[in-house]
């Protein structure tokens, strides 16, 4: 098989057939060139002797319905979804696992016999990552979530509720979004105690003090000069601080390290959600450590 290009487009997909498609698995997003998923999945495919390839597809929001339809008829086994498609894909799928329905987001799709099934492995990936990074179970922690109003933050907040976190604080610039999410959390079978606050508000100080795990789920930190979403004076050495951004050390993580807190980024979440997706597609254990090696190598070589 010839080497994969960095990124393919919908125009490429339109010209493929099952015999000519350069890959059978992909990550769909806009943008998607930065994704570290392909090296990780290619390493897993090679290790398991599977004759497939995994690439990147740049698909705009308005192109998603056509792209999904074409994928089902081009020999694809499945795809991962990243921004901005995780919520928009829901009405386009044949079936959705119950947990993904509750979370309102799908990041993994499996194709079979003309049907498409949606799953969410992000939440479980985060849970495994927290356990690996900090040696504690997510379900035991009082959690404060920064950027809870966005798609990723909303899904992670709901997952924390489903996982059994006893207390969840939702921090979001648009309070109405956080309040709506709080209503959903309070309606769960075993609801957590829920608080809502705006960034920078005086009311946030005691809530941060009580939190054990701080989860950063917004896009703030993707650019080198982005500020932190949390005032550095609120951070303490007892905090566990997790930023879902993995492309660079964010201001939040630098401030947390300076305060003596334990920190982690979203790289291991990407690893574990990818391993779970692999297991959905192939119904076999993923070669986790080989995937980890490939992911770390890819991210290391991507740094300037």
Image (tube, helix red, strand yellow):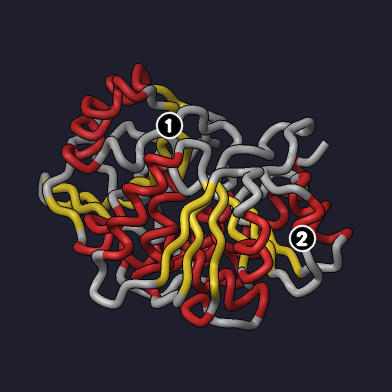
- 159 or 85: which is nearer to us? 159
Q: Which mark is residue 30?
A: none
Quarter of the figure with the C terminus: top right
157 left or right of 187?
A: right
- SS for callout 1: strand
Question: Picture quarter containing residue 185?
Answer: bottom left
Q: Label 1, on which residue?
A: 57
**Residue 204 visible, this angle:** yes
- 244 or 28: which is nearer to us? 244
Please identify, in this view, whether the residue under mark 1 or under mark 2 is nearer the observer: 2
Residue at 64 percent across and 82 percent down: it is: 135
Residue at 14 percent across and 53 percent down: it is: 95
* Neighbour tally class for label 2: few under 14, some 14-19, many 20 plus, Cα within 10 Å: many
Image location of residue 130, percent across then percent down: 58, 71
* Neighbour tally class for label 1: few under 14, some 14-19, many 20 plus, Cα within 10 Å: many
Residue at 34 percent across and 70 percent down: it is: 162
């Amino acid at each position: 098989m010839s080497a994969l290009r960095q990124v393919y487009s919908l125009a490429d997909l339109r010209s493929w057939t099952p015999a000519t498609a350069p890959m059978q698995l992909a990550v769909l997003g806009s943008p998607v060139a930065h994704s570290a998923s392909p090296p990780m999945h290619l390493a897993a495919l090679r290790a398991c002797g599977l004759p497939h390839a995994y690439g990147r597809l740049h698909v705009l929001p308005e192109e998603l319905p056509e792209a999904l339809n074409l994928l089902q008829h081009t020999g694809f086994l499945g795809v991962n979804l990243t921004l901005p498609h995780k919520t928009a894909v829901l009405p386009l799928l044949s079936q959705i696992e119950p947990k993904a329905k509750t979370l309102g987001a799908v990041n993994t799709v499996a194709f079979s016999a003309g049907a498409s099934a949606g799953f969410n492995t992000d939440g479980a990936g985060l849970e495994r990552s927290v356990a690996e990074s900090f040696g504690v179970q997510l379900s035991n922690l009082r959690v404060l979530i920064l950027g809870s109003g966005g798609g990723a933050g909303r899904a992670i907040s709901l997952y924390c509720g489903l996982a059994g976190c006893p207390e969840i604080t939702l921090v979001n610039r648009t309070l109405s979004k956080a309040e709506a999410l709080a209503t959903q959390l309070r309606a769960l079978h075993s609801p957590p105690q829920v608080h809502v606050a705006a960034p920078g508000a005086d009311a946030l100080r005691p809530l941060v003090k009580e939190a054990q795990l701080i989860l950063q789920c917004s896009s703030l930190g993707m650019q080198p000069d982005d500020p932190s979403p949390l005032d550095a004076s609120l951070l303490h050495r007892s905090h566990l601080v997790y930023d879902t951004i993995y492309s660079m050390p964010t201001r939040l993580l630098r401030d947390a390290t300076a305060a003596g807190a334990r920190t982690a980024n979203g790289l291991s979440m990407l690893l574990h959600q990818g391993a779970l997706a692999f297991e959905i597609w192939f119904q076999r254990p993923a070669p986790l450590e080989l995937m980890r090696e490939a992911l770390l190598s890819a991210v290391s070589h991507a740094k300037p």
